[in-house]
Amino acid sequence: MLDVSALHSAASNLESELGSLANDIDAVTASSCASSCSPNLCASLRTSTLRNSALNVSSLPDLNSTWIVIEAVRSRNQFTELAISTRERLGRISETIDQASGDIKKAVNSSLMEYSDLIHSLSDGVFKTMTEAFPAEEVIEESTDIVETALDYDKYRQYFGVALTSVFIFLVLIYSAGLILGVIYYDETALPTERRAGSNLGGNILLFGVALTFLLGALFMVLTILAFLFGSLLEKGCEPVEDLGYFKEFLDKGKVPGYSLSDITLGIDDLELNTYDVLIGCRADLTPWTVLKMNKVVPLEDYLLYLNYLGNLGQLLANLQLVDISMFRVVTSDLVQSLSDIQTIDPSDVDFDSIKNVLLEQPVSIDISATLTEMRGIRDACNGQAEALWSNFISRMESIEQNEVAQVQSSLNDLQASSSALESSMYSFAESAQEIITSAAYIDAQLQNNMTSILLQSSAGLAGRMLTYLDSYATEVVYVIYNSLGNCRILWNMYKSISIVLCDYGVDTLNGYWFSIGWALFFFTPIIIVAALLANHYKTMDAAVGYQEFDDILEEGDYPDVPAETSFSGAHPTSSVQS
């Protein structure tokens, strides 16, 4: 609404306050300024301008007649009530459709529940069958036991390896110690019967090493024989375990009487199920459903064919064509009359140009700041009562600026917004009213002619989406069962663990033992020979038998105290040795 009266009231108050202030200033100028002000500047303030400075709103047009017409249309038509009643009538369409589609909802719910029960029963059956075929808890427990056994065996294998290595190192250290002592304390000029104690100790250590090597070698050979007896059998048993072709060429071709993997896992005799294919499938991390060919036992795809559970849903959807919605209309006589009344409002009835001209004006035609400055100059030139009166005039002028002038400006702003909105709206009233009538008539035509087919299409679309969801759900169930549910990699891991424990940890350990003994024999054979020969050069001899140097000394007569029987033929020292 254009609140012109508010602007009239604000402008009138402003004019009254400015007039009262001007009258009081004239009275003081005439009575007190001459005697109390020096110089007398009171008359310099033009009060006539002050009286006539308020905004003149007399040119604003009279809008009462226009508002009377608008109020009459509004009060007579009650657009809000019409809109509410129309919405209520249209809202009852959904109730009618709900009543007609109740059987469809029941059929859909029944189909969904039946399908859900089927899915759950199939899931339970699949879980039960796979649990019986692959007892996961037992497999995990057995795998855990195998791993623990392998860890224990590996611990003892390491202990034995350390012990065997320690024996070899100990022998090497013995030979090294004997050799080092012999080299350090060996005296080329000393007789064999007079060698140093260190050299003699080195020779004895070498002989001790030789004796210990023969003793340990005999023990290791006994262990080798026993290990070979056990290892050969284990090696023979590991060949089919590590070579999956054994299952394909032996078990799966029926060479073991009474063996049937399908009977063991599924309790079915006539299902062709190969052990080789199962192991390969588990190695590829396939599901038990795929590996055990359970689709031949439980026809999952046939059970999940959702079209078998729709019942008479199609017939119920076709019955929606019989829904009667001819009673529902948007275009009523009241609506047409109300919209026709709106078209009687003419935008030219309001003089918007005059309103715009007034809105371009300021609340006052004077510069209030300059006027206040002039009034403060007059006050400063006065004293006594005149000074106090002028101070009061200044306060009143400031109050007028803050209140009355601000109120006029606020009214101008409100009128500006209202007039702009009204001007833009009035020109579209007639067009909007006609568009509403046209749209309402179109809605009626759709309701009467196309609503039934739209309902049928929507219902068919709903049914199509429901079937799509069911199809997607069935596809997902099949995919999960075939590809994700209970992958049997754990069976392959258990089989591989047994293979590692028996073959890698068992046979390979024995192979390592044989390998170590072989290399020890290869290296220690020349060591024993060299140690036995060197011992004669390092240890102290009871008699220098067979040493050419000793015979030469006897011939020269340098040692007359040596008995004659100690003289020998002069053979090489290594040809005959007595300890």
Image (cartoon, rainbow, N blue to C red):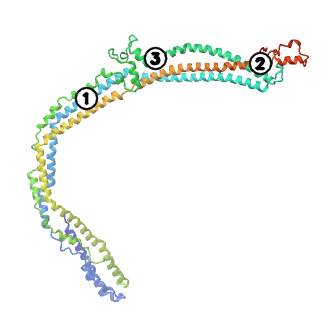
Quote the CA–CA distance across marks 1 and 3: 48 Å
Residue 394 in percent (x, y) is at 33, 78
Q: Which residue has dot 3 on it?
A: 240
Q: Is mark 1 on a helix, strand or loop?
A: helix
Quote the CA–CA distance across marks 1 and 2: 98 Å
Q: Which residue has dot 2 on it?
A: 536
Residue 318 seen from this side: yes
Residue 8 seen from this side: no
In which quadrant will I find the C terminus? top right
195 left or right, relative to 476: right
> Badge 1 local density, few (<14 within 10 Å), some, or many (20+)?
many
Residue 266 in percent (x, y) is at 35, 18
Q: Which residue has dot 1 on it?
A: 115
Q: Is mark 3 on a helix, strand or loop?
A: helix
Q: Earlier in the sequence, mark 1 or mark 3?
A: 1
User: Which amino acid type is shown beneath numbered disc 1?
Assistant: Tyr
Residue 184 in percent (x, y) is at 77, 27
User: Which amino acid type is shown beneath numbered disc 3?
Assistant: Pro
Please report the residue visible at 43 percent of the width from the left and 22 percent of the height from the top: 139
344 left or right, relative to 458: left
User: Which amino acid type is shown beneath numbered disc 2?
Assistant: Asn
In which quadrant will I find the N terminus? bottom left
Please report the residue visible at 17 percent of the width from the left and 35 percent of the height from the top: 102
